[in-house]
Each structure stands twice: as C-alpha cells, then as structure tokens.
Image (tube, rainbow, N blue to C red):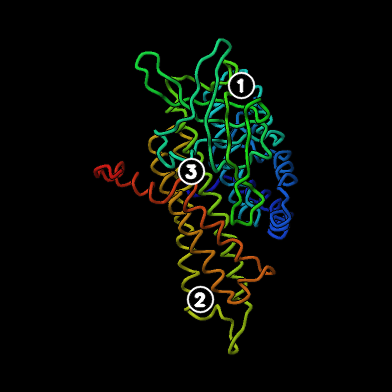
C-alpha cells in the first residue's frame, strides 16, 4: 500500500467529484424531501463506469477493487450526494457473485450491476435475530425443482428500485440436521415476495423495507456458490460492506466539515471571522485529524481486501467502520454548532445530515459489535456475548 495515490486514482477522484458537484446536496436533499430517488445520478455514474469499477472487465466492470469503489462513494458523499445502494449492489452483491457465482450468474447479473441498469438489494437482518446472524430463521428447503424459501427480513435498503435481492437464508445439513447459512438470488417480482416500507425519521431518498418471503419457489441455480462454504462467502461480502459504509460516513464527514469551515471563514462577529477563535477552530481541526485517520484505516482495509487478505481485511474493515462512524457524528454535530442558528435551517443544509451520520454508528454493524469483535479477535479477550 502506497501513501501516494496513483495517477489513475487521483483522476478517478477528480472526475467523480465533478459528477457529484453537478448534482450536489441541494439536488440530493430535494429528491429526499419530495419522495424521489437518485436514479438520475445512479444511471449517469453507471454509464461513466463508476458503479462497476470494482467488477471484472469481462462483465463490463473496471477491473479494479474495493479501493477504487470506495473512492467513488467517498467523493460523491463529499459532494453532498452519497449513494447508499453503492454499499450494497456493486459492493456486497457484485463481489459475492463475481467471486463465487456460476458463469451463468455472472453473465446474468454483473453487467447490469456494473452499468447501473440493475440494482440488487441485500437481506440479512431479521426482527428477532438482530446482530446475531447465527439465529437467522429464514429457511430454504429442497424441492424437486430447486428451493422453497420462507422467512422475514427487516431494514432492507432499496427494494423499491431493486430487480433482485441477495438473501441470506439457511439450509438443513443432511448429515447433522443443523441449519447452515446459504445465499440465494431472489427476483423481486417472484411469487411469494412482498415488502412493506418502514417509516424512518431520516431525510433520505433511500427507503427501508420489511421483506416477507412466503414459500418462494426458486430454481436450483438461485443458490450462490457452495452450501458448505456459505459462511466464508457471506463474510467475503460483509468486508466490502464495511469498507463502503466507511466511505459513506467519511463522505458525509467531509461534506459537513467543508460546510462548517467555509462558514466560519466568512462569518464575522466582533470584527473577526469566527474561525479565528480557538473555540471553533480546534474542534474543526480535531475532526480533520480524526477524518484522515479513519480514511487511512479504510484505505488499509481496502488494500488488504484487494490483496486477498480476507482475515486481516476483516479486522481493518471493522476498525475503519468504527472510526468513520464516530467522525461522521462529530463532524455533523460540530457543523451545526459552528453555524449556530443557521445550522438548523434548510438553507444551509447541515442539520439534515445529523440523523444520516448517526445511522452510520448503527448500520450495517453497530459500534458495540465492532468493539466486541476487536476485544475478542484483536486483543484475545474472552467473548462477552
């Protein structure tokens, strides 16, 4: 890993940043408040090759890795228009299919994921399981023609715009009778698939849903990869998810810090810009430091993942997600504080970032579960849950 980005990645940052500024926060916020979506930006980003930059070239992707994809999301977020489904569609789903899918699955799904014409959701969370993925009850049983899938999922992003959803279910081991995880591609319009929007107190164009699977009949080829290796395959998708969630949070933090810094440079009270006062300058400087540290850990996680170091990438991705979520919360809160009353207005557009930043502490994995992971796996402490 080099601390000097390649010319190609610097150019990628530049052109993605230009695309983000073309739309910007005002457009993003308008879409969110009107009940709209980000399809216009999504499709343009796909057409330009940004969404599939991590996917294999033979399927229409850019042939890069998670480091490249994280740059795209970070720069869009810094411009005020983070695309949440980038955390899911090309990252989790695209990675799992490209690494473990059959040739037919790759041909069927990857080109659309790469150019943005296909969006795939990801469903793992269940109402009773919470963070305990071992308690998932969505179950697939074998049929004469393939599989029957039944279960329920919650807080699933983007089902309104997705053509399919990658579902984490469980199958019964014929030898032991125990349930083991398995991944299935489920078309959103398949009989037995229903979803209902969950009303959220977030100003976001990305909606959350409860997903219901009632005896959904799937062909044999709906199973992704091997039944026996599904846990490994699942974590191969969750590490990119954490890297991209970090990029999402870092983009928000950069956007908030940029707004706060611009404001305190110009706003004058008592004949001097308020940014001259240490009471405002120091908190913003601290956020800049924490932001760069989080970014470094995200880049380390992406570099490890792209090098095939899945175990080390898991530790780094969790740490990056923790650090990015923390700095996003601090950056948005300090942005509001720096702007004073203006920080609460629609015109300046920083208060609406607070809830989105706060969500990065919770999803896709909570800060407490990350601390559990680090305590147990990095420090060797006894398991606490």
Label 2, label 1: how far apart the Cα atoms are: 53 Å
131 left or right, relative to 340: left
Which labelled disc corresponds to residue 246? none
**Which residue is depicted at the point 73% across and 41% down?**
43
- Indicate which label's residue lies in the foreground, 2 or 1: 1
- Residue placed under numbered mark 2 in the picture: 280
Q: Return the x and y of residue 46 as percentages of the image width and height.
A: 70, 39
* Quadrant location, the C terminus: top left
188, 323: nearer the viewer: 188
Which labelled disc corresponds to residue 105? 1
Q: Return the x and y of residue 321 as percentages of the image width and height.
A: 46, 49
Which labelled disc corresponds to residue 242? 3
20, 150: nearer the viewer: 150
**Which residue is depicted at the point 72% across and 34% down?**
117
Q: Residue 271 is drawn in which quadrant?
A: bottom right
Label 3, label 2: how far apart the Cα atoms are: 31 Å
170 left or right, relative to 345: left
Q: Residue 94 is drawn in which quadrant?
A: top right
- Indicate which label's residue lies in the foreground, 3 or 2: 3
First of labels 3, 1 by sequence position: 1
Task: Look at the numbered disc 2 and give the secondary structure of its residue.
Answer: helix
First of labels 2, 1 by sequence position: 1
Few, some or many C-alpha atoms within 10 Å of disc 2 (few <14, some 14-19, many ≥20)?
some
**Which residue is depicted at the point 58% across and 85% down?**
272
Few, some or many C-alpha atoms within 10 Å of disc 1 (few <14, some 14-19, many ≥20)?
some
Is 370 above or below relative to 89? Answer: below
Task: Look at the numbered disc 1 and give the secondary structure of its residue.
Answer: helix
Q: Are marks 2 and 1 in contact (CB under 8 Å)?
A: no
């Amino acid at each position: 890993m080099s601390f000097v980005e390649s010319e190609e990645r610097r150019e990628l940052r530049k052109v993605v940043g230009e695309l983000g500024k073309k739309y910007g926060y005002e457009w993003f916020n308008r879409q969110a408040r009107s009940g709209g979506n980000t399809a216009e930006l999504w499709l343009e980003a796909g057409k330009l090759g940004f969404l599939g930059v991590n996917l294999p070239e033979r399927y229409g992707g850019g042939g890069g890795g998670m480091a490249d994809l994280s740059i795209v999301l970070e720069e869009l977020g810094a411009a005020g228009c983070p695309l949440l489904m980038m955390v899911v569609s090309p990252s989790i789903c695209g990675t799992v299919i490209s690494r473990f899918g059959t040739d037919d699955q790759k041909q069927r799904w990857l080109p659309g994921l790469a150019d943005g014409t296909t969006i795939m959701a990801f469903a793992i969370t269940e109402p009773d399981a919470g963070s305990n993925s071992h308690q998932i009850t969505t179950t697939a049983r074998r049929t004469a023609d393939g599989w029957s899938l039944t279960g329920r999922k919650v807080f699933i992003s983007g089902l309104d715009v997705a053509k399919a959803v990658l579902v984490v279910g469980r199958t019964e081991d014929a030898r032991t009778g125990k349930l083991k995880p398995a991944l299935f591609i489920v078309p959103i319009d398949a009989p037995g698939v229903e979803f209902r929007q969950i009303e959220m107190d977030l100003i976001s164009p990305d909606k959350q849903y409860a997903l219901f699977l009632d005896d959904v009949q799937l062909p044999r080829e709906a199973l992704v990869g091997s039944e026996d290796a599904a846990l490994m395959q699942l974590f191969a998708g969750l590490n990119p998810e954490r890297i991209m969630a970090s990029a999402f949070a870092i983009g928000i933090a950069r956007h908030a810090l940029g707004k706060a810094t611009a404001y305190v440079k110009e706003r004058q009270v008592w004949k001097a810009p308020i940014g001259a006062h240490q009471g405002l300058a120091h908190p913003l400087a601290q956020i800049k430091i924490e932001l760069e540290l989080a970014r470094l850990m995200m880049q380390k996680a992406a570099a490890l993942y792209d090098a095939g170091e899945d175990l080390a990438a898991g530790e780094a991705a969790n740490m990056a997600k923790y650090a990015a979520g923390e700095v996003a919360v601090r950056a948005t809160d300090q942005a509001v504080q720096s702007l004073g009353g203006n920080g609460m207005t629609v015109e300046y557009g920083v208060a609406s970032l607070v809830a989105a930043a706060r969500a990065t502490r919770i999803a896709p994995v909570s800060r407490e579960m990350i601390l559990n992971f680090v305590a147990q796996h990095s420090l060797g402490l006894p398991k606490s849950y």
